Each structure stands twice: as C-alpha cells, then as structure tokens.
Image (tube, rainbow, N blue to C red):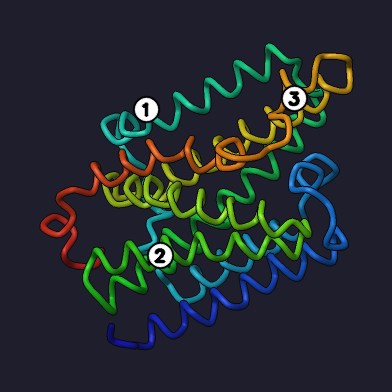
Amino acid sequence: MQMNLRLGLALVAFVIWTAITVIGGNLTTGGEASLLDAVTSGLGWTWLIAAGFILAVVLWLGWRDVRLDRWTDAAGWRLVWLPMVYIAGGLVVATFLGLPPAMVLLLVLLNTFLVGFSEEVMFRGVLLQAFRHATSIWPAVLLTSVAFGAVHSLNVFVTGDLMAALIQSAAAFLSGLVFIALRLRTGSLWPPIIVHALWDFATFTLGAAGAAAANDGLPAEAATPAGATGLVEFLPVLLVLPNAIYGLWLMRDIRRTHAAPDA
C-alpha cells in the first residue's frame, strides 16, 4: 500500500474523529451506560460533533468523491431489499411488544441518523476513498471494513462491557460489507447512510420495546434472551451474517468495475 497525502490526511481525520466519538462518549456516559441508554436519554452531542467534524473535513478539502453530492436511482434503491427486510421485521416485533413513547422514538431516530451519517461519511466516504487512492479495490474494502469493526470495540470505554464491545465489533465488520457494497454499487453514500441509520433505529427501538415489555410484566425471556450465553450471546453476529454474504455477492465484480477510484 502506497502512503500518499490523501491517505495521510484521511488517517489523521480518522484519529481525531475516533477521539471525539470515544472520549466524548466516555465523558457523557461515565463509561458505564449502555448504548440503549445513550440513544434514548437525550441528544447525542458527541455524535453531532463527530458528524460535523468529518463533514467539515470533506467540505474543506473538497473530497467530492465521497459522494454526498450524488443521489441514486430506483435501481440503486432496490439493492437495499435484504437489510430493509430485517429493519421492517424488527419494527414489527417492536410494535408487537409496545413502542416507546413518541419522544423517545424521535430521540432514537435523530441519534441513529447522526451515528449513521457520521460513520458512513468517515468509513465508506473518507476512509474508503483514501484507501482506493493507495491500493487496489479489494484491499481498500477489507481495510475499511476492518477499521469499522475495530473502532466499535472501543465502545468498551463507553459501556464498560468488553464482551459486548467485541461482539459488536464483529457484527460491525460484517455489516460494513453490505454498507460498502451499497456505496460501490449505487455510486452514492446516501443508501448506506439511510440503511445504516434505519438499521440502528430498528435495533434500538426493539431494545427499548423489549425492556419496557419486561418491566411491564411480560416474561423477560419473551423480550430479551435470558442469560445471553452460548450462541445467544453471538446472536448479533449470526443475524448480520446474511447481510455480509449479500454484500460480498453485490461486490463480486468490483475488481473489474471499480478498479480505479471515483473521480
């Protein structure tokens, strides 16, 4: 891999973005709050600042090839069908369990949009394009996905739960494959931003509904896995595995179709 100015600047931005996200999150939560508490208790100022920072970097340096300036057509939106099936299913189950209050739902939607926007601009935008200017397409895809997974392990400093952070890291690596496939196949960053945000929205809405249902007298095992041991502990990884396989299938020809970086 050839180090160049573009990659160097992107890596510096990545370090600063990570520091904002992790240190800011730690200061906000005290290192012990769950991510569900973080997205339902108020506006995520850390995510807002991180999103604002990386957007400012993109605008300042004129990196238009991250493709925030391009939408996609109907054919592109059809590619999101598999993750949208998951999202719809999660929201249906959450509705069955009992949706949180409207204000909580609004907070979750706003915070998950901030997270989706911030992470997609950082990874599938800035970092992916920087790697594409330094190496060939498949190493760029894998390096971006590994970085995306690895940064989620740092959530241990926000939640204090190492095992949960490592499992989330593995799930994020797999999810990153479908997000990056959508970015490459549609030529726009907006499909992965929207799918990412809605995925997180469905996940946290389901978590909030499950917690509320357990507190309201529904048997806890009907809302959340009891004990979270064995395969159940790795359920997030197993759930996103089909998305990862789908993402790899979408990228089956990228060595030919995406050999050169976007202009």
Give the position of the N terminus as an image quadrant: bottom left
Instruction: For mark 1, give the secondary structure.
Output: helix
Residue at which label 1 appears: 81
Instruction: For mark 2, give the secondary structure.
Output: helix
**How far across and down, in percent of the image, does residue 211 sit?**
80, 28
Say if 259 sits above or below 241 in the image: below
**How far across and down, in percent of the image, does residue 52 sit?**
64, 63
Residue type pointed to by label 3: Gly
How dense is the environment of label 2, judged by Cα within 10 Å: few (below 14), some, or many (20 and up)? many
Residue at which label 3 appears: 210
In this rendering, would 112 be left or right of 86?
Answer: right
Q: Is residue 263 visible?
A: no
Q: Please name the residue shown 73% across and 22% down the image.
A: 221
Q: Is residue 150 visible?
A: yes
Residue at which label 2 appears: 144
Q: Please name the residue shown 70% across and 67% down the image.
A: 22
Quote the CA–CA distance across marks 1 and 3: 25 Å
